[in-house]
Image (spheres, helix red, strand yellow):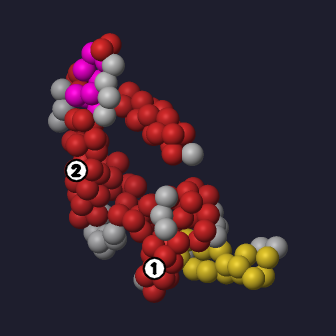
């Protein structure tokens, strides 16, 4: 990783952010699942559920492109999720040769329970934080969204 002389600690901040995001995400998922009494769903399946929740019905190919996953990975994920009652398949509208995948009511309910539980545990943890940390965290979501968009722009 090359750095410019005027980075003023950006490399250290980037390294720390990269090291913290994964463990933070796993801790939030674990705590929210436990709080919401939800089954353990693999992270990759949660990403598929989130994408389908945002986009609606989608072809497996489009899902793979959107998530940066190989066709075989998406196929295996969708098959497992279909067995678990989280997604369903249908013939693609306007093209009877291909299929689309969409969320089941069970998946929609589980996502709603997860979102409520995640919000609750985050509010509790943030309430126990200092006022300065709460201010920083309140701004962090928008900054992380902009940063993610920049990263996705590089992936194209």
Q: Residue at x 55, y 57 (%)?
A: 66
Rendered location of residue 86, percent (x, y): 48, 76
Residue positioned 24% across, 35% down in the render: 15
Mark with earlier residue (2, 1): 2
Residue 23 visible, this angle: yes
Helix, strand or loop for disc 2: helix
Q: Position of residue 153 (x, y in %)?
A: 54, 39
Q: Position of residue 111 (x, y in %)?
A: 44, 63
Q: Residue furthest bottom?
A: 83
123 and 98: which is toward the camera = 98
| Image quadrant occupied by the N terminus | top left
Q: Nearer the viewer, residue 152 or 86?
A: 152
Q: From this view, report whether residue 116 is shown above or below residue 58.
A: above
Q: Is residue 97 above or below residue 41?
A: below
Q: How many marks?
A: 2
Is 125 on the left-hand or right-hand side of 58? left
Q: Sort mark 1 into few (<14), some (14-19) or many (20+) by Cα contacts within 10 Å.
A: few
Magenta segment range? 7-14
Instruction: Please rate how many residues cluster around mark 2, counting C-alpha atoms within 10 Å: few if below 14, some from 14 to 19, many from 20.
Output: few
* Furthest residue in direction right, as rendered: 94
Image disc number at residue 23:
2
Quote the CA–CA distance across marks 2 and 1.
25 Å
Residue annotated with mark 1: 76
At horizontal 35% and vertical 64% (from top left) the residue drawn is: 43
Kindly report which numbered mark, 2 or 1, lies closer to the viewer in this rendering.
1
């Amino acid at each position: 990783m090359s750095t410019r002389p005027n980075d003023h600690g950006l490399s250290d901040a980037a390294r720390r952010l990269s090291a913290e995001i994964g463990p933070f995400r796993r801790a939030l998922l674990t705590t929210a699942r436990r709080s919401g009494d939800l089954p353990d769903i693999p992270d990759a399946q949660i990403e598929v559920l989130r994408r389908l929740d945002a986009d609606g019905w989608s072809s497996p190919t489009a899902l793979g492109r959107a998530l940066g996953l190989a066709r075989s990975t998406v196929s295996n994920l969708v098959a497992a999720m279909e067995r678990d009652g989280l997604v369903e398949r249908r013939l693609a509208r306007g093209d009877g040769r291909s299929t689309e995948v969409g969320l089941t009511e069970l998946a929609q309910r589980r996502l709603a329970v997860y979102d409520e539980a995640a919000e609750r545990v985050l509010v509790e943890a943030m309430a126990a934080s200092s006022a300065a940390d709460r201010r920083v965290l309140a701004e962090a979501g928008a900054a992380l969204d902009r940063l993610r968009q920049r990263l996705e722009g590089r992936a194209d």
